Amino acid sequence: MLDGKTIAITRSKDDASEFIALAEENHAKALPLPTIELVSKGEKIVDEFLESVEKYCPDYSVFMSSKAVKLLFDTAKDVGKLDKLQLAVANTIVMSVGPKTTAALESEGIKVNLQPTTFSSVGVGEEFTQINAVGKKVIVPRSGASTPFLKELLNKIGIDVLEIHLYDVCAFRDTTQWNEFRELFFQDKVDGIVFTSASSVRGFFEIMQKDFDESKLLENLQKLSVIAIGPFTADELKKFNVKNTVSQVHTVLGSFDTMKQILSDC
């Protein structure tokens, strides 16, 4: 049981609503930690996407996060080009990495044709392998901080990939929301942390190293359960010498279930 346990997640309060609800249902305390901010590349991202679709003529468009969807479509609304964007995307076969991204696309009037059963870059690769998309073209609007893994994986399958970088990320600047976590973490009163992206790992360390030296930070992290939402997040944690468990299902729910199992066994 999780009665009285305190679990942090590297997401803002708004983005962590599902996690907070799960924690409350299990009588645990959730601590949302906004670790990263999106730095948009500006209004030009819409024209860049539209021009790329016109020149590149992709067969598929792949969306790897709900944040990328929201940023692209919100910017299109701001510059009065929503109809053009909807038409450009609708003229491709649309793949979404997972249910949250699918919901974001559908809320913008976009029909999602494909969604992998494993919600990750690997799952996207598996989906393309199953549908035999050799020789096809794919456009992927995403973060500038993304790893080249997806592009390299699809290239190996025989798919041509064009990535459009919509935004960069930086560590969250207003860290007043971290005050309670800092205090509890210093007192060894945090039971677990769920890291939700490689970028959030980097943001976490950048923020926390303002108050803790690295050895003390690692010492305290070793005392609690650390869950990585997926393999890339796990790899980033390993770079910082943090032992972690990878969620079998690469979603917030899957990560929570993994954390619940580990803490219940303690």
Image (cartoon, grey):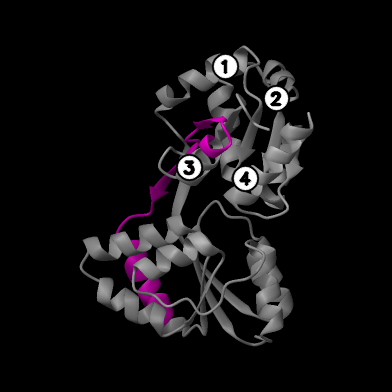
Residue for badge 2:
221
Name which of mark 4 and mark 3 comes first in the sequence.
3
Image position, residue 259 (x, y; %)? 68, 39
Mark 4 belongs to which amino acid?
Ala
In the image, what residue occupies the spot 48% across and 67% down?
A: 102
Q: Which mark is residue 184?
A: 1
| Residue 227, picture quadrant | top right
Q: Check the picture and name the quadrant holding the C terminus.
A: top right
Residue 198 is tagged as 4
The amino acid on which the numbered mark 1 sits, given as a three-letter code, is Leu
- Secondary element at image label 1: helix
| Label 4 Cα neighbours within 10 Å, binned few <14 / some 14-19 / many ≥20 | many
- The amino acid marked with disc number 2 is Leu
Q: Is residue 129 left or right of residue 181?
A: right
Disc 4 and disc 3: Cα gap in Å?
Answer: 17 Å
Taking the image as shown, residue 78 lies to the left or right of residue 258, namely left
